[in-house]
Structures are given as structure tokens and as C-alpha cells.
Amino acid sequence: MDDLLQEFLAETREMLAAISGEIITWEAEPGDRARLDSIFRFVHTVKGSCGFLDLPRLERLSHAAEDALAEVRSGERQADVALVNAVLAIIDRIGELTEAIEAGESLPDEDDHRLINALVPGSAAPAAVAPQAVSGSPIRTVSRSIRLPIDLLDRMMGGVSDMVLARNELSRKLRDSMVDGAIEAAFERLSLCVAEMRDAITRTRMQRIDHIFSVLPRMVRDLSAELGKTVALEVEGGDVELDREMIEMIRDPLTHIIRNAIDHGVELPDDRRALGKPVAGRLIVSARQAGNQILIEVIDDGRGIDGERLVAKAIAAGIVTPERAESLTWTQKLALVFEPGLSTAQAISAISGRGVGMDVVRSNVERIGGLVDIESRLHQGARLTLRVPLTLTIIPALTVSAGGQTFAIPRSAIEEIVRATGDGVRLEPMGGVHVAAIRGRRMPVVPLGKLTRGASRPVSPPTLVVLRPAGGALFALSVDAVHDHEELVVKPAAPAVMATGIYAGTTLPDNGRPMLLLDPAGIASVTGVASQQVANAEPDAVAEEAAPLVQTLLFRDSDGIERAIRLSVVERIEEVPASAARFSAGRLRIAHNDQLLPLLGHADPSARTRLRVLRVSDGETQLAYMIDEVIDIVALPPLADSAVQPGPVAGVVMVEGRQVELLDPHWLLADAAGGLPQPSARPICLLVNAEDRWMSEILRPLVEAAGYRVVVGRAPADSRPDVIIDTGGPHAELTDGGVPVVRLRTAPAPANGADDSIYRYDRIGLLAALDGVVAARR
């Protein structure tokens, strides 16, 4: 009986998470019979199970709700606000009783009769609120599954991780020894099985983000009623999956952002009517995957964030000086909302006004390796974007060594890697410490060997790894050597190690020696770098925004020519045996780490014993590009001179007086994706997805080469765009109306017959669409 009871409690919790949202949607659409049936089935299931398990209180409550809903199903009664409030109160009490039973506690039952009486037509019900519209929310069905203890899943994940490390070590030993083809083939089959098993076990840790989204309709309904506002909620992307730990860690930050949007953002109905806006405010919560990150956006069409008012509050609070405030950019003004103790609320309430909120949101998101972006226009609305990694267990990292020890650094925090003797790099002593001046940017230098108290073996010259912790200031980490990019399985380190504040965990690479993962934000805090807040930001930030530079990888190509490629599309640099390359199915391919990738280059791989390749990726499509050696990472301006014909070279850039060919990632990835078509006053093309690096780093050079003036994120103040390119997502609220939009999709085939989007690697189709809409407007 105990097992049956635990099963009942677990199933009831799962159904409760989805059913509140169904009730809110049914309230807005009383004629939706499918949702009414879904709610009825829930209370009917609870009632039936309670009779078998001898739970009389739950049975009475669910039976009363079932009777009331049965009257609505039969047409004897109409759904109204009073009935919805009464049913919600019953649902809440069922949840409270479920938790009490599981905890072995008792719950007073004197209010049960009041809740049941509230279901009777004309009875005094709990405080009524106006129905809130909810769209984009399909009927949720609770999937049946087998429940496993979380610690069992963790042990399974740990075992598979050890298998992967053993596989990697065996692979290294096989590469170093001469083995016949039969052993290599058997090892490849073993590697494929291990990879499939790791993916399967990893998926068991994943949960749909709908576990968070399902409670939003109820929260929005109750909060907007409390504030006297009307809010229409739209939820998108509930089927996106995240690691179960990540789901719990983003729950509180997301809740706070939504409460802020309703409290601070959406205006009162009379104010919205006076501004010519719809009485009901619009709140969009969406999730989507971008590479190895999940982007969660919260968009409202409310009053927006007043940057000037934030600056005035910051000056009054002593956060910035009046002199510094004059040089702040709009983005920096908006970033002040994350400063501790800063609040624009007029009065303290139970919801806001105490100056604690957005700074906690940012710190919580940064703690899991995420970022918070904010964009706003006064009286038009705001968009907050949470960028969080898919999982906390496997992260891409760069391995470095200092003081005789090897460490890993999360790649998401690395801005660039430079040699201390490189051009444009100077190390200057200042007050007993060193400051690095890298191409005009000054930043403190933290010696990693000294910080970790490693062996004193100074290396001259050191290598500087420039880090930017999420939301923090730039600083340079001085290391002895940089080794390789790896995907590492991270586990918690010993408490004494974690207490130092500079480590994020431990990992075991394929050489079998434990390695510590550094925490860039922790290092910044321990060494005092984190104290460099926006008040002390470099004044050249405005200049950088006016003339953006792009991090670019310089390398010597396999034909001996110096070339460059945007660093954002380079996933890693690897060395593979030449035997892994083979011409098959009409093109040159390389088999590496259980993946088959197109191989591009200017040399015959069979003439070499080992190949050095760039792993180029846009988050979905990948390819390998063969090179001779890496030269440097430099910050370069946009393309100086475009190529005459479309091809692998986009154009030429100047690097210290030298002409360097810049590769065209759009052309390369289009070739890898399998479809490579042939190819007055400049019209303006707006790329609205400012956070999408594929658009800025891959698509932008193509559009500029076609003769367009490209702007990213928002249109210039002095002119309107001629055409907008969008890759999907709720961005229309922040774009100018009346401008034609060309929509791109990631899949070669459209999702349905009504889909007028263009495949993003259809070069001819995209350019023809751009030319067509611009010609029609003129």
C-alpha cells in the first residue's frame, strides 16, 4: 500500500503542475470543451484513487469539484469567474494535502466545507479576478513514465562519464601505437556505442522547460488581479529541454523577471488607454535552443525602462559620479538596473521597491554560467534574455598550465588569448601589480601560478587569457602555456577546495590525472577584480560601440597563405591522424570523435601524417578546415574589401599593414550543409536578432557583399530599414511596423505549406528575396 500511495502522490504532483494553467486558459475560453474535459479527468482520477487508498478528505474535495464541472459539461451551468476561483481553491487544497500526506503531517480541515460551498452557484467565493487571456499554450497531457531515484541517475551518469574517459585514454594509446585496421574498426564501433549510451543517459537528466512554464498562467492571473491590471500571456517553446538541475536554478530568476514585468512594466488599463495601447498588456515568455545554450526571453509591451531615471537614481545613491554618467551609453544606462540597492519603484510594496531583485537575478544566473541581457525602449516595452547552458555536467573548456599544474577554464568566459610579446600588447607595473594594455584596453593581470600557489617557475613571456566573467569586468589570467579545447565532465570538488572560491569543480581528462575547473567570477571576486564596477568603466566603451571590432583568428592555411576567420564560428582546434580523412560519397570527409565531418582545405591530406583542423560550427552545421598553424587572435574591424565572386573567401582585411584574406563562414557552412547555389544608394537591411551570432558573424558578410548597409539589433535613428531579416522568435514588438520581413529557417524543408520562410543557406533564394522586397518598396 505504501508503494501505491507514493505512486499516487507523485502522479498527483505532476498533474497539479499542469492543471492550474489549463484552468486559467479554460476561464478565458469557456467554450473549449477539450480543456474542460482535461480538468474533469484530473479531479475524477483523484477521486477514484482516494476511495481506494482511504483518503476521505481528498475524496470529498475532488468529488465536489467533479460535480460542479459535470454541471458545466452537461450545459446546466456556465463557467464564470466565481466557479474558476472556487475550482482553483480546491486544486490548491489538494496540493496542500498531498504535501502534508507525503511529509506525514496533519492539516486542519475546518476550511474544507467553505471551499466546497463556494462551488455552489451564488455562494460567496474566494476573491474574484478578471480572466486573463493565455495563448500559445496547447493542451498539456501528463506522460506516464517509470520513476527512478535521482541518485541512481547520477551514478549512471558518473559511470558513463568514466567510460568516456577510459575510451579517450584508449584512443590516445592506440594513436601512439601501430595497430591494424581490424582493431581500429572495432574501437570505432565501441566508441559509437559509448557515445550513444552517454547521450541516452544525458537525456534522462533532461526535463521540459514546461515544468516551469506550466505555473505561469496562474501566477500572471493572480498577480495582475492584485495590481488591477489586465495581462495577456503568451507562452512559447515549452518543449525545450534542460538539465533538471538547471530547471530548478532558473525558476526563481525567471519568476522575479515576470513579476517585475507585470509590476514595473505593464501599465494600468487607464494609462494604456491614454497612450493608445490595447487595454490588456502583452507578456511573452519563450524558450529556444541556440547551439549549446538555451535562450529564455521575457518580453512586455509596457512602459519600458527609463535609462535617464536610472542614471539619476544611481547618482543619488553614489553608484556613479555625474561626470561618469555623462559618458554612459544607452546599454550601460540600462545595465544600472542590476546594481544592488537601486530601485525605481515609487513605494515599497509586497512585490517590489526594496532595491533587491535584479542584482540577485543576475548573480543567480551567473552562478550557473549564464548571462542576462536587457533591451528596452521607453513606452514601447522591454526584453530580458536569459542565456543558460544546456547542462551543468558537460562543459566546453580550455586547458592551461601554470606553476607546474594543469587547469581548465570555461570557454564561455574567454574573450581572447594573446601572447605578452604580441603586437599591441604591453605589460606595465603599477603599484606592485601588473596591468595589461591590449590594443588600447587596460585590464589587471592575475598570475595563475601565484594565485594557486604552484611551483615558482616563471615563464617568459607568459600567455594572457583574457576573461570576462558573466556581467563582470575584463581581466587577464597569466598562464605558462595553453594546451587544447576539450569537453569535460564536471563534478563537485572537495569542500575545502571549493571554499577557496576560485574553483567551480573537478574533472578527469583522458590522461587520467584529476584537473580543477577554474571559476572566472570567483577569481575576479577573490583578487578584487570584481570591484571594478560600471562606475570605473573605461571611457573608451563609447568608441568601441561606435566602431565595433570582431575577434578574429589568424592562421597559416594549408597552402601557406595567411588567412583569417571570425573566432565566434571556431568551436575548437584539433589534431587528427591523416588516416581519419577519406574521400567518400563525392567529397572529402573526416571521421573524428564519433562524428563524420566535411573536410575543406588546400592540401592533400594523404601527404601528411597528422592534420591540424579548425572545427567550424554555427551551433547546428559543422565542418573541419585544414590549416598549418595558428598565428594569433586579433580584433579586426568589419570587412575592408569584398571578394569579386562568391566563394570561400569573403574579402580582404588589413592586419598591421598586411593584406589577409578573410574566409566566408556562410559559404563554407552552406557547402557543408549540402546546398551551395551560385550567386545607387545602399539599401538598409536590419538584422533584428542582435544576440544571434550566426546573423552577425555568418550572415552579415554575405548581405554586405550583396550591396546592403547592415545594422544589427535596432534601426538607426535617422532612417528606416528597407528590409528586415529575422530567424524566428517574438521580435516584432521591438521593430518598426510596415517594413517587409524576410524570415529564415534552419531546416532545408518548410514546416508546412503556409511557411514562406527561406532556408538560411539558400544563397540565391535569400538574395532574390532581399532584392525583391527592396525593389517593391522603391
Image (spheres, helix red, strand yellow):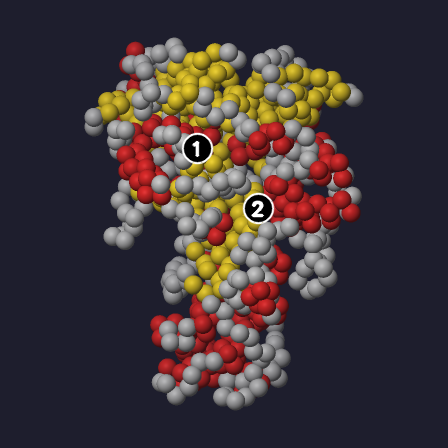
- What residue sits right under mark 1 in the picture? 709
- Rendered image: mark on residue 374: 2
| 163 and 696: which is toward the camera | 696
The residue lying at 57 percent from left, 49 percent from top is: 377
Amino acid, disc 1: Arg
Q: Is residue 397 above or below residue 233?
A: above
The residue lying at 78 percent from left, 21 percent from top is: 431
The residue lying at 68 percent from left, 30 percent from top is: 539
The residue lying at 40 percent from left, 83 percent from top is: 72
Amino acid, disc 2: Ile
Going from N to C along the chain, the mark reached first, 2 or 1, is 2
Please indicate, yes or no, whether residue 493 appears anywhere in the rendered image: no
Q: Quadrant of residue 100?
A: bottom right
Q: Secondary structure at mark 2?
A: strand
The 10 Å Cα crowd at callout 2, few under 14, some 14 to 19, many 20 or more, is some
Residue 373 locus on image (x, y percent): 56, 44
Residue 629 locus on image (x, y percent): 44, 15
CB of mark 2 within 8 Å of CB of mark 1?
A: no
Residue 141 locus on image (x, y percent): 38, 65
Q: Is residue 732 left or right of residue 381?
A: left
| 595 and 647: which is toward the camera | 647
Rounded to the nearest whole Å, what is the CA distance between mark 2 and mark 1?
A: 25 Å
Which of the two marks, 2 or 1, is nearer to us in this view? Answer: 1
The 10 Å Cα crowd at callout 1, few under 14, some 14 to 19, many 20 or more, is some
